[in-house]
Image (tube, helix red, strand yellow):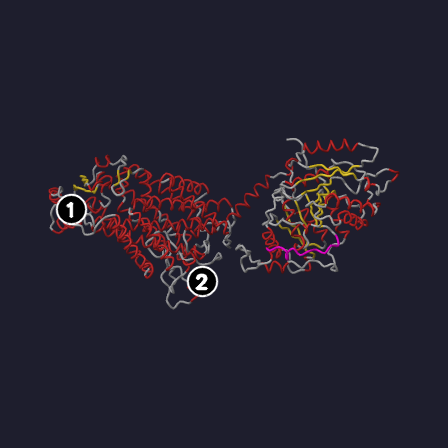
Amino acid sequence: MLNERSPLIPSGVCGLTAAACGVEPDPDPDSTPESISGTPSESPRKLNTFFGVMVPTILSMFSIILFLRTGFVVGHAGLLQGLLMVVVAYTIISLTILSICAISTNGAIQGGGAYYMISRSLGPEFGGSIGLMFFLAKVFACGEYVLGLVEAILDVFGRNPGRFLLTFCLRYLLQIPPSQVFCLFSSVADSSVSERVQLLPQGYWYTVLYSSVILLFCLLVCLVGAHIYSRTAFIILLVVTVSLLSVFISSVAVKPLNFVITHNGPANQTRRYNASYTGFSVTTLRNNLASDYSLDYSTNSIMSFATVFAIMFTSCTGIMAGANMSGELKTPSISIPKGTIVAVFYTFTVYVLLFILVAATCDRTLLIQDYGFLQRINIWPPFVIVGVYCASLSAAMCSMIGASRILHALALDQLFGLPLAPATITSRSGNPWMAVVYTWGLAQCVVFAGQLDAVASLVTVFYLLAFAAVNLACLVLEWASAPNFRPTFQLFSWHTCLLGILSCLVMMFVINPVYSSGSIVLLLLLLLFLHFRSPTSSWGYISQALIFHQVRKYLLMLDVRKDHVKFWRPQVLLMVANPRSSCQLMLFVNQLKKGGLYVLGHVQLGDLDTLPSDPVQQQYNFWLSLVDKLGVKAFVDLTLSHSVRQGTQHLLRITGLGGMKPNTLILGFYDGCTPEDFFLQDTAFCGSSVGQDSEGEYNFGVDLPSLQAHFPPVRHVESPRWLSPEEYVGIVSDAIKMNKNVCLGRYFFQLEGENKDSKVDGSNRTIDVWPLNLLQPGSRDYEDVCSLFLLQMACVLNMSNKWRHARMRIFLNVETQSSDQSWVVNEETFRELLRKLRIRASIKIVPWDSVVQHHPRPNGELSSEPTLSALSEDFLSAVNCMLMEQSSQAAVRFLYLPRPPAHHGRSQQYLAQLEAVTNGLGPTLLIHGVTPVTYTGL
């Protein structure tokens, strides 16, 4: 994947210069391999505003439509609707131009045109999909220009060329007046069509044949002589300008003429139409004001506003030609806005004047029934013929060149993988000849449409979609409010971007709903394809800026004063010493968070005063790569501290933001067990690759060997601990003082089926819950805050994906031999509580008289106060045996965690008691809750 500054082969949008198409002159054959391989060459910026922006943009917008479809638009739509179409089209492209100018003046644009702007603004998924759509638009445009050129050739040399040549000789060589020429032809108007002399045979397959020959010529030129355009652009512009001037001069110099136009109708019938050129006439102008949509003789279909607009809009698709030249412009921030806007204003003026001219001088029949009528009314018809041929052939070649450069840029970015890999092949001169061949093959398929009008709608829809994407790119950059988005062009706002998007989308569906729907579906499929391929680049992701902007806004709205218990969810801070031995617990807590905050915390021991730099910052990439490998939805927060206890306090206080702060601390259990290395068990940690992981995802410079080497080996039995028992219990005590719930997880290395590839749904699992404080038998309260919190956590686990079908059992410990039989009433009360809390679980009564008898009884009664120091080993062993007997088959157990002793001297005894109770149980979570979490109301 290329980096942000990697050079791409430039591309244009139907300009008639190699520069406008993104084609630079072929480098010197003796150029160094570095320049051929893609290293930026130190080519000076030579082009000014006129040659670098105005010339390519004007030539791009003066395509074959100007000469062959102006009368078609005015004839069907009328002058008023025709001018409306021009205004609508130029409004759309003007809104897009504002976005182009903004993006292009926010940094240097390299090759690829719209693809480069969109991909570097919206990211690889959106940029790649729109880039491919834009490539297809240029391919279809190439086919459209070729078909238009064939139409122009057949209009002169195909349909009765003998008559055209004879007219030319009579009028301009023998100086016979036009009226006598008309009379001469009228006398033979009834002659048989079969008697006409045809230089080129006509028909569908002949049209395809001629188009294929022209495309082959374009292919040869693009393969060996693309650099010619950079030297002939201005000459071509002069030729087109002379042709336009001849049209305007002819409207004054040529006297009124009458014509008989014939077309081949169905059943091999010949249709004749009497048409006239009246010169400037108010009557003619009045007759051409209103619309009169009728049959199009080339497609034999009834025209409408949408179909006519689609054809007319193809002349407005070259607005990006100048923006693509930023790398060769002396002052791109000035030239692109100024040159593009002036070029668009100039072409708009020409189109408006030409529409008014033909509406005031030609009757509707002439406009509708003869696409090449400008030849008939010109003072010298070859002016128009040369203009048509020059504009269409040059536009076709430039579309092929520009499309190939876009394809080459897509291939270099490796977004679509193997199918486009051959398009990266270039010649010694740097010409991407394989991409040219790709483009030629697709354009060859387009010419099978056989008619220019049949392709115009699809071309217009694709271009409108690309324009909408450019506006979207500018819109999201503006909405993201990134400080580095500082375009020197300021005449835009998010309103213009949004209006540009909406206008493009609306006109797409007005033109052709089927093509528009199909193009959007194709775009979505490409987006999904690129999303699942997960291409990662260093271009920057606008999505990240937008997410940051929205998250900040909603975090400010998340008011902790408005918290309510019925919307409570666990916000977990899991402290991890070494991920090698904690991965199973990390995976389990990922199921326990229920859409809440999940943070992996780690304390690095050290003193920043004695270190040259902060060692924590360098570790984040490794931890984030670990999160990706495990597939958990967690944040990472690391800190540097003198002790683990102090570091944990820091994390409990500062982790999170606003209303998203941890309310629950989870720790691994402090015991003497030798931890197991999870990295040696999971297949996800057993393969390696450079740059990408086993699934082809980019790993941000952290490959698997580096990840494994970063985290130290697991602790051995003889290895010293970072944490003392007093410090560990102190962490638990600190969290409770800070009003945080505390969970201690033991034996979770034995838990299986929690990894992201597991298909476990919990149907064979059991969750056992012991809500009573087993170390204080005198406490018979099942409804205290801690017991209810324990029930809530078990219920949350039961709602997760891998545990939703697990059976939950709740164990009630009772003294059946006691004289006090209130436990029967307590059981019914507890069942009613579960019903109110909507907790689906089976209740199991466990007599534990044999266990309680080992508990010390001051004054002959069970104490309800904490007397952990007085617990005998027999009692602890009896509790453990009871748990083993009742919950040996459970997948996980939830136990009541007693409050730690206030005196730190009893910390080791406290841990020893917890270790004795849970010894050999399997995955167990000891929980002490301090916040109310259940609610029985609505």
Left or right: residue 234 compared with residue 653? left
Three-letter code, disc 2: Thr
Q: Nearer the viewer, residue 148 or 773?
A: 773
Q: Is residue 278 visible?
A: no
User: Which residue lies most toward the bottom here?
Assistant: 30
Three-letter code, disc 1: Ser
On the image, the x and y values in percent for residue 110 come to: 43, 56
Tell us which disc is closer to us: 2 or 1: 1
Q: Nearer the viewer, residue 745 or 626?
A: 745
Contact (Cβ within 8 Å) of mark 2 with mark 1: no
Locate the C terminus and report the quarter of the image it occupies.
Answer: top right
What residue is shown with label 2? 39
User: Dot 1: what SS?
Assistant: helix
672 drawn magenta: yes
The CA distance from mark 2 to mark 1 is 63 Å
Question: How many numbered discs?
Answer: 2
On the image, the x and y values in percent for residue 78 come to: 27, 37
On the image, the x and y values in percent for residue 806 come to: 65, 42
Quadrant of residue 221 in the image? Answer: bottom left
**Label 2 vs 1, first from the N-terminus:** 2
Q: Nearer the viewer, residue 682 or 387?
A: 682
Which span is picked out in magenta?
671-683
Q: Is residue 503 visible?
A: yes
Using the image, tell me which numbered label, if any, was put on residue 194.
1
On the image, the x and y values in percent for residue 260 come to: 17, 41
* Main secondary structure of the magenta stretch: loop
